[in-house]
Amino acid sequence: MILFPAIDLKDGQCVRLKLGDMAQATVYNSDPVAQVMAFEAQGFKWLHLVDLNGAFSGRSVNGAAVEAILKVTRLPVQLGGGIRSLQQIETWLAKGIARIILGTVALRDPGLVREACRAFPGHVAVGIDARGGLVAVEGWAETSELTAVDLARQFVDAGVSAIVFTDIDRDGVLKGLNIDSTLTLARSVPIPVIASGGLACMQDIHRLLEPDCRILEGAISGRAIYDGRIDVAEALRLFAEMR
C-alpha cells in the first residue's frame, strides 16, 4: 500500500481545491520544490502531481514547476493534468516522470490510451474522476453519462498500470474516502486502483488496512497531510507493514 502525497499546482503554487472548484483554492506552499523536499524528508516513496491549470486548458501550464521538482527529487513522480497527446506523454517521460495519468483523453480518445500503453508499457495510468458516480472531465467542468466502472472496463486489456479514482464530491472537504465506490471499481477490473478524494484522518488510514482494501495499490492524500490531520510517520509505517 502506497501513500501518495498530492501536490496540485495552480499558477505555480501548491494548492488544494474544494470540490474541484478552481475559485476555491487554498495555497499551502508558494514553493513546490520546498514542498517536495519536505515530503521526501518525511519518508514518502512516491509523489502525485497535478497541473490544475493544465487540466482546464488541455495543455501544460505548470511545466516549469514540474521540471523544477524533477531536478531535486529522487522519488518517482506520477503526473496528470492537461496531457492529451502521445508527444506530451513522451516528452514528460523523457524528462523523468515515472507515470503519466490520462484523464480527459481516456474518455475522449481511448485509442490514445491504448497506443500510449503499447509505446510506454508500465508508465501510463488512467485517472477516473467521478461526480455522483459519473465520469467528469475537462478539469471536472463537464460530467459525462458514463460510469466510472464502465470507463475502467474499456481498458482491461490495454496495459494500463493503474487507475486513479477520485470521488469529486469528497475531494478537498475531508469527508473520508469513498471506500465502497473505490472497492466496487477495484473489484470490477484487474487493474490496480488508487483511492483519491476525501482522505481525512487516521481513521481512513486504518480503514485502508482492512483486508478488503488490500486489492488497492494505495491512496492519495492532500489536505489531511498539509493540515496535520494524519500522523504521516505512523501512516507510512502502517502501510509499509502491509505485505
Image: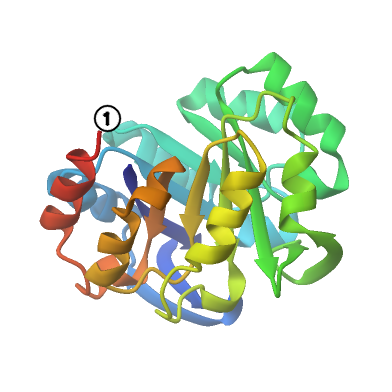
Counting from the top left corner in percent of width and height, residue 91 is at 61, 26
Residue nearer the viewer, 62 or 133: 133
Residue beneath the point at 71% across and 48% down: 59
Counting from the top left corner in percent of width and height, residue 192 is at 53, 37
* Number of marks drawn: 1
Seen in the picture, residue 71 relative to 130 is either above or below; the reply is above
Counting from the top left corner in percent of width and height, residue 147 is at 78, 60
Seen in the picture, residue 113 relative to 193 is either above or below; the reply is above
Seen in the picture, residue 30 relative to 74 is either above or below; the reply is below
Which amino acid, mark 1? Arg
Q: Quadrant of residue 26?
A: bottom left
Q: How is the image coloured?
A: rainbow
Q: Determine which residue is flagged by label 1.
A: 74
Q: Residues within 10 Å of mark 1 (few under 14, many from 20)?
A: few
Counting from the top left corner in percent of width and height, residue 112 is at 81, 31
Residue beneath the point at 33% across and 39% down: 46
Q: Quadrant of residue 181?
A: bottom right
Residue beneath the point at 60% across and 71% down: 168
Residue nearer the viewer, 119 or 51: 119
